[in-house]
């Protein structure tokens, strides 16, 4: 699944267009490498998102095409998060 779509489906980012902007602006890393919106993600990948002064590192657990909002958190596991530099 494309990175921008995963960010939207998992509800880590509210809109896919915003996810694309964040990715293309260098705000997302996949397995410690800068990633574009078109990067394919799969279970086991580690994503680091930088949103303003906040950052979050998550492990991808599943990549469903569609999922209910109340189950979205089951698609990833938070490994670390904080403020400032990642």
Image (tube, rainbow, N blue to C red):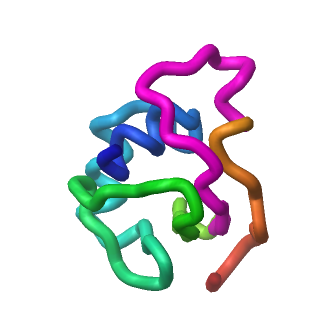
Instruction: Please indicate whether residue 37 sits to the left or right of residue 81 in the image.
Output: left
The answer to whether 85 appears left or right of 77 in the picture is left
Estimate the x, y position of residue 75 in percent, counting from the top left.
64, 40
Can residue 69 be found in the magenta stretch?
Answer: yes
Q: Along the horizontal axis of the image, is 57 left or right of 11?
A: right
> Residue 22: x and y, percent?
36, 57
Quadrant where the N terminus sits is top left
Picture layout, residue 44 above or below residue 76? below
Q: Quadrant of residue 77?
A: bottom right
- Asked where in the image residue 15 lies, by quadrant, the reply is top left
* Left or right of residue 78, residue 6 in this image: left
Q: Nearer the viewer, residue 63 or 7?
A: 63
Residue lying at 65% horizontally and 61% vertically, measured from the top left:
59
Q: Which residues are magenta?
A: 55-73
Vertical position of residue 7 compared to residue 32: above or below: above
Residue 30 in the image, given as x and y percentages of width and height: 44, 71
């Amino acid at each position: 699944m494309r990175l921008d779509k995963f960010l939207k489906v998992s509800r880590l980012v509210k809109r896919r267009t915003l996810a694309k902007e964040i990715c293309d602006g260098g705000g997302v890393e996949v397995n410690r490498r800068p990633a574009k919106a078109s990067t394919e993600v799969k279970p086991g990948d580690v994503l680091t998102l930088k949103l303003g002064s906040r950052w979050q590192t998550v492990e991808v657990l599943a990549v469903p095409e569609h999922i209910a909002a109340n189950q979205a958190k089951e698609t990833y596991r938070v490994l670390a998060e904080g403020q400032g530099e990642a």
